[in-house]
C-alpha cells in the first residue's frame, strides 16, 4: 500500500515524512510536518500516523490548555478527526486499510 506523503488538516497541508529516528512518530505542528519512524512495521506506521493526526487536531484547537474531562473532549475531537479523514481518503485507506 502506498504511504501518503501529505495530509490536509483544516486547510493546512502537512508533509508526512518517513525516516529512521528514535521515536515512533512526531507532530511538528508549526512546521506542518508529521514524522513517522520508517523502521517499524507498516501497520505500526499507520497506527502512529493516526496518533500524530490526533496531535495535530489537538494542537490546532489548543485543547491542551482546556481543563476538561476526557469524556467532554472525546466528542469534539472525534468529529474533528473524522473531518480530516473525510478530506483525505488516501490517508484514511492507509491508516484503516
Image (cartoon, grey):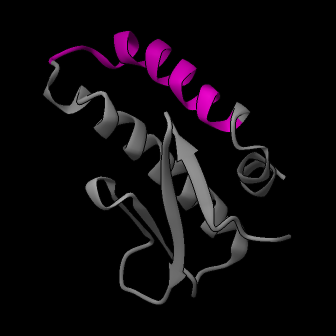
- Please identify the dominant SS of the magenta region: helix
Percent position of residue 31, x then y: 31, 62
Query: Residue at point 13% right, 27% down?
Result: 65
With respect to residue 74, does 65 lie above or below? below
Compared with 21, 31 (above or below) is above
Q: How many marks?
A: 0
Q: Position of residue 45 (x, y in %)?
A: 61, 68
Seen in the image, is 31 located left or right of residue 39?
A: left
**Residue drawn where x is 54% and y is 60% of the image:** 48
Between residues 51 and 6, which one lies in front from this camera angle?
Answer: 6
Q: Was residue 61 drawn as part of the magenta stretch in this picture?
A: no
10 lies above or below 13? above
Residue 17 picture location, percent across and down: 52, 75
Residue nearest the viewer, comparing 33 with 54? 33
Looking at the rendering, the stretch of residues picked out in magenta corresponds to 67-85
**Residue 68 in magenta stretch:** yes
Res 73 quadrant in image: top left
Amino acid at each position: 500500500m502506498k504511504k501518503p506523503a501529505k495530509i490536509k488538516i483544516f486547510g493546512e497541508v502537512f508533509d508526512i515524512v518517513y525516516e529512521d529516528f528514535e521515536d515512533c512518530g512526531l507532530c511538528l505542528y508549526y512546521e506542518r510536518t508529521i514524522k513517522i519512524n520508517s523502521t517499524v512495521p507498516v501497520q505500526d506506521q499507520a497506527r502512529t500516523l493516526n496518533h500524530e493526526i490526533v496531535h495535530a487536531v489537538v494542537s490546532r484547537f489548543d485543547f491542551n490548555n482546556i481543563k476538561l474531562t476526557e469524556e467532554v473532549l472525546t466528542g469534539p475531537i472525534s468529529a474533528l478527526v473524522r473531518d480530516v479523514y473525510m478530506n483525505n481518503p488516501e490517508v484514511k485507506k492507509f491508516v484503516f486499510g
